[in-house]
Image (tube, rainbow, N blue to C red):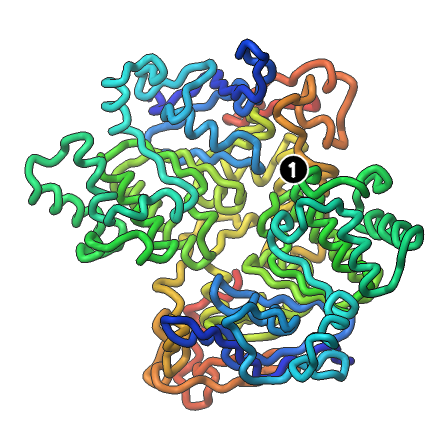
Amino acid sequence: MDRLLEVTNLHTSFRTYAGVVQAVRGVSFHVNRGEAVALVGESGCGKSVTALSIMQLVPPPGKVTEGCIAFDGKDLTAMTEREMQHVRGNEIGMIFQDPMTSLNPVLSIKTQIVESLRLHQNLRGEAATHRALELLRMVGIPSPERRLAAYPHQFSGGMRQRVMIAMALACSPKLLIADEPTTALDVTIQAQIIELMKELKEKLGMSIILITHDLGVVAGLAQRVVVMYAGKVAEQGTVDEIYKSPQHPYTWGLLKSVPRLDATRKDKLVPIYGQPPDLISPPQGCPFAPRCDWAMNICKTAQPEFTTLSDTHQVACWLQHSMAPANPRVKRGGAA
Amino acid sequence: MAPLIEVKNLKKYFVVARTRLGAPKSWLKAVDDVSFTIDRGETLGLVGESGCGKTTVGRTICRLYEPTGGEVLFDGQPVFKLDRREMLAMRRKMQMIFQDPYASLNPRMTVGDIVGEPIDIHRLASSKAERDEMVHELLHTVGLSPEHAARFPHEFSGGQRQRIGVARALAVNPSFIICDEPISALDVSIQAQIINMLEELQEKRGLSYLFIAHDLSMVKHTSRRVAVMYLGKIVELAESVELYRNPLHPYTKALLSAIPIPDPDVERTRHRIILEGDVPSPIDPPAGCRFRGRCSYAMPVCAEQEPPMRDVGDGHHVACHLI
């Protein structure tokens, strides 16, 4: 399949007084055209920093220190700020978790949408207004003619997120990065936004990177899943591979620690004990080893390599090694 | 056996505007005529979207807000009629765990003082040594160690802070704890730790919980019965398995179908009821049934009459004209 985005060995660090925080430590994944890929993990695992690195928007003191981000045949890490400004908005759109803080409260949404149309598509006056209306209609804002001149505070949370999506789609980008787009919203509104994103993906044929910690949202929207832990990719595969035959103990933990609404009997939740490691001095071995029930001696001393299980399914775990003791499949119970 | 908590026609209105003479002009009816009971050792789940009044219910029960109307009986004792001194004694029996573990702990107090404060207020320890012993015991109960007592809240992660909040609630040995979204600020792997701890404590100490949350799958897991709130009212109350298997109110149906399930096969085949629009403002709620504006089954009668709460058998209650 045709690759739109390929991230190879990405490293992003933040130089702080306490030391260098290695937020992203060698992340590689790709996004095909027209595909939705989910980056899943807990807070601090580096999923948002990965997205910001792609956009070249890592706030100082953060810096992309290594790696290559190939987007549509161009290397984004080698671009100048001017060239990047053309890519942002025009080719890659982004929406953020909290729509209230990412919209300017003192400008009407018309001003904010028209601004990006003017900058990127050179649309002015009538034409820009017309396009803005079209966008609001597309994201399902009722009576857009009346709402266009309104200010962000006059919209509800769900409607604001729709405005954000309209702005991100203003220039028909090839890739939409959605950073926790529904975390701040209620479940019924979340369902509306997820349906909208699905529908727009089909209609516009764009690719989506969905960043979330909610495995339920992922199952409904994405085709492939990248599970991140402590700045590294732990496992990646298609949704079916990740949910039906997960291979990394961290993925098992994620799936078993949330109760399922359709569960018929009550099982005790299986938490993952302990805390994620400190990324100022990340552990020498597998970062998940201290919290892993199946950790072996080697896990504490050496980083696991990726094992390829199928064309799409890769996992970084020593349990996959041919010398590892019998796979503890019996104990884990998978996604059930 | 009589229930531990009986909430009858609870009302809490907030004044949002006043006339020039200071008389209330318009009200926000956060909680409008809510009734339920909680048995000893039981967990009652209270779910609803933001702004539906679920937190206000919790806070009004323990009189962090003064009620506008209604009655709460704790073990037969009317909570709203107690004077200051009696209320202090009552607070030994009911405690609260808050949503945000970052905002609910005083950053300038050590953990030992945070957990020890209720012991001091209620004079539960006769000496400093006994107090410290009790604090250490409490920290141990929630999975922290005694040397944590000298540290400050900022040295702890979100999950550990929530443990401190639980230890503080347990300090007075209550029989009822209001858990106001205790896990929504935590990561998924940490959520399960806190939930398991709350369940173990319930088994060991026979605690009753009012578990307030917006995450219906977690509420279904923790609670024996679940009440669904919409715009200040309970629209449906049933045993959690029954509520999931046989939801009757159109809002409950929509709420259940909106919750994503971590299984791609289920998600592909699922029929989803997407609610149109947003929750209306509780300042001027629609007359009749409050849900009718978003309900696809709304009938003329829904605009005229407020649907009464009806028992449809086996403790399943629902307020809808369709039933």
Q: Is A141 above or below relative to A279?
A: above
Picture mark count: 1
* Quarter of the rendering containing residue A75: bottom right
Using residue B41 as the reference point, say whether residue A257 is left or right of it. Answer: right
Q: Which residue is drawn at 73% across and 28% down?
A: B293
* Quarter of the rendering containing residue B177: top left
Disc 1 sits on a residue from what chain?
Answer: B
In depth, the one of A85 and B106 nearer the eye is A85
Q: In the image, what residue type sits under mark 1?
A: Lys
Q: Is A123 above or below relative to A62?
A: above
Name the spot of residue B20 as percent of width and height, x first: 58, 12
Q: Is A63 above or below relative to B297?
A: below
Q: Which residue is drawn at 27% across and 53% down?
A: B152
Q: Can residue B41 be seen in this view?
A: no
Q: Sort mark 1 into few (<14), some (14-19) or many (20+) by Cα contacts within 10 Å.
A: some
Q: Which residue is drawn at 74% across and 56% down?
A: A197
Name the spot of residue B323 as percent of width and height, x first: 67, 23
Which quadrant holds the N terminus of chain A?
A: bottom right
Name the spot of residue A44 as percent of width and height, x first: 47, 65
Name the spot of residue A214 as percent of width and height, x first: 56, 57
Q: What element carries label 1?
A: helix
Look at mark 1 in the image and give the residue it sits on: B253
* Quarter of the rendering containing residue B72: top left
Q: Which residue is drawn at 73% across and 55% down?
A: A165
